[in-house]
Amino acid sequence: MARRERVVRMSVEQPLWRALTAYRVLTMVYAVLLFAFGHGRYERPWVAVGFLAVMCVWTLATLPKVASAVACTRRFLVADLALALVGILLTPLADEQARTMDGTTLPSIWTAGAVLAYAIKGGWRWAGFASSFVAVANIVERGHPSRDTLHNVLLVWVASIAIGYVVEVARASERTLARALEIEAATRERERLARDIHDSVLQVLAMVQRRGTALGGEAAELGRMAGEQEVALRTLVAGGLIRTSYVSEDESEGAVVRVVEEPDDEDPAAELDLRTLLLPRAGARVTLSDPGTPVLLPAPAARELAAAVGAALDNVRVHAGEDARAWILVEDWGDEVIVTVRDDGPGIPEGRLAQAWGEGRMGVALSIRGRLRDLGGNAELISVPGQGTEVELKVPRAPRERRGKAGTK
């Protein structure tokens, strides 16, 4: 039985939700104990008892709401913060000395749990929003900001924003790790498929090629086709089953994420790796030589250049014969990309291109030179009778508009 690769997604923020659940319960008990040991200083203890009763019921009833990011809704966050703010503002009503003496509020440090829920749910921006309301409520509760009040407000503010930022970085790291695990699983599956293909399909194609060549006749043609398919399949397996078109970097979350993925065809700014477009052109009689690094071009330019290469190879098959060999050389010079297509055919007789144009056959003029001209590049054709033909395709990387402006200065 084949072993399946399974990507296990881990949640780095789930322990934070469990810690928040425990924090809310412990701080609820702490607020109740503070009142129990200091109830004698309250002028209106029934106000404190009423609020603490509501806070305890709310805390215990909403424990599932702080179990995960999905359960913690915005409506719950607003209600939870509102309850904390009401408790702060009710403190002077229950204890008239709270305005003149530094002390704890009715919810005490339970209020920080509401702010931390914002931080874990929405990051540092949400944390700053919630802690600002708590800061205003504490200042209003005191009537005038004292040193201890400003200290507590600043502590909640900085701590909540820091935790929110850490949560955002953790989420970015989690996405990077998940993607890395997916790529690892895909790589292992590709290696498994490569082994299976090597042990079955490639061996069969190689056998068909040898037997067909030995038998001759129509079987030789079948063997030749099997040989071409074997080379193409080996190239595909060696290059990977997933096309690697471009590498994107996302630094918005404080981490660099390098992801190999297929760009959006509708995005004109997307880039393609020219090597992946030319790879299917390689075969038993077509050799592809390309750099070891991606050759990135704007998607339309890459496709047009690949199409021009395809037109050049079509001319090789038509005019040089099925047995002719061809070589594709890709060069990346930074400011321009050069692709050379060379064959070992008989070459083009002098004047043949002009004659073809007069006969209405415009393969070289339109399929090759026309494409390169539209890209702002050029195509040069060199052919010596008896020594084959060489087509050099040059595509600049600078936009055509920029070159036009530079030329008019």
Image (tube, grey):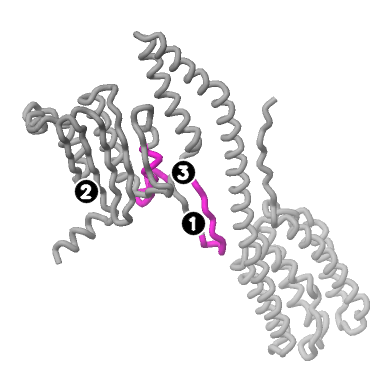
| Residue 249: numbered disc | 1
Mark 2 residue crowding within 10 angstroms, few (<14) / some (14–19) / many (20+): many
The residue singled out by tag 2 in the image is: 377
Graded by Cα atoms within 10 Å as few (under 14), some (14 to 19) or many (20 or more), the crowding at tag 1 reads few
Q: Earlier in the sequence, mark 2 or mark 1?
A: 1
Residue 208: x and y in percent read 46, 15
**Distance of label 3 from label 2 (alpha carbons):** 25 Å
Which residue does the image show at 32% across and 41% down from the upper left? Answer: 329
Badge 3 density bin: few <14, some 14–19, many ≥20, Cα 10 Å? some
Observer-nearest of 316 and 140 = 316
Query: Residue visible at 69% across and 88% down?
Result: 145
Mark 2 residue type: Gly
Determine whether 173 is above or below 289 in the image. Answer: below
Give the total of numbered labels.
3
Dot 2 falls on a residue whose secondary structure is loop
Residue 81 is situated, as x and y percent measured from the top left of the image, at 70, 67
Q: Give the CA distance from mark 2 to mark 1.
A: 29 Å
